[in-house]
Amino acid sequence: MTDRKIIWLINQYASTPETGMGGRNYYLGKELAKRGYKVYLVAAGFSHLLREPPTLTKDFLIEEINEGFHFVWLKMPHYNGANDKKRIFNWFKFARKMLNLPYILAENPM
């Protein structure tokens, strides 16, 4: 068992600089990892804000950004923009998939 504290940052609309704009969650996770925390940033694999959504062949993808910082993409259904009614379904689906997070990630927050 590691002595490093484990943090889960969860934001459906988070992104990396390659897929979207990056944003505060990405940079916060990166800085926390530099300070010795083990960080998992969990986001939707599709949203209308992503320029280049990741290609997900499974229900999730864990991408190591750097030492101690992992980006977790959850596979989500596509919709056609911010005003699409299917976006509401996406919100609930993301919340439902969060229930599986303890089984996806071997390490729980401490």
Image (cartoon, rainbow, N blue to C red):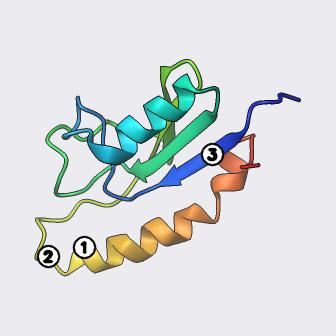
Q: Are marks 1 and 2 in contact (CB under 8 Å)?
A: yes
Q: Position of residue 105 (x, y in %)?
A: 67, 43
Q: Amino acid at mark 2?
A: Asp
Label 3 – label 1 distance at C-alpha: 27 Å
Q: Nearer the viewer, mark 2 or mark 3?
A: 3
According to the picture, the residue beneath numbered tag 2 turns out to be: 84
Q: Is residue 105 above or below residue 102?
A: above
Under circle 2, the secondary element is: loop
Q: Are marks 2 and 3 in contact (CB under 8 Å)?
A: no
Left or right: residue 91 versus residue 70 is left
Q: Which mark is residue 9?
A: none
Residue 88 or 22: which is nearer the viewer?
A: 22
Q: Position of residue 49 (x, y in %)?
A: 17, 53
Q: Nearer the viewer, mark 3 or mark 1?
A: 3
Where, by quadrant of the figure, is residue 6 drawn? top right
Q: Residues within 10 Å of mark 1 (few under 14, many from 20)?
A: some
Of pointers 3 and 1, the one earlier in the residue sequence: 3
Residue 1 or 34: which is nearer the viewer?
A: 34
Of pointers 2 and 3, the one earlier in the residue sequence: 3
Q: Amino acid at mark 1?
A: Arg
Q: Which mark is residue 7?
A: 3
Label 2 – label 3 distance at C-alpha: 32 Å
Q: Which mark is residue 87?
A: 1
Residue furthest right in the image: 1
The reply to whether residue 13 is in sight is yes
Q: Position of residue 91 (x, y in %)?
A: 37, 73
Under circle 1, the secondary element is: helix
Q: Residues within 10 Å of mark 2 (few under 14, many from 20)?
A: few
Q: Position of residue 48 (x, y in %)?
A: 17, 57
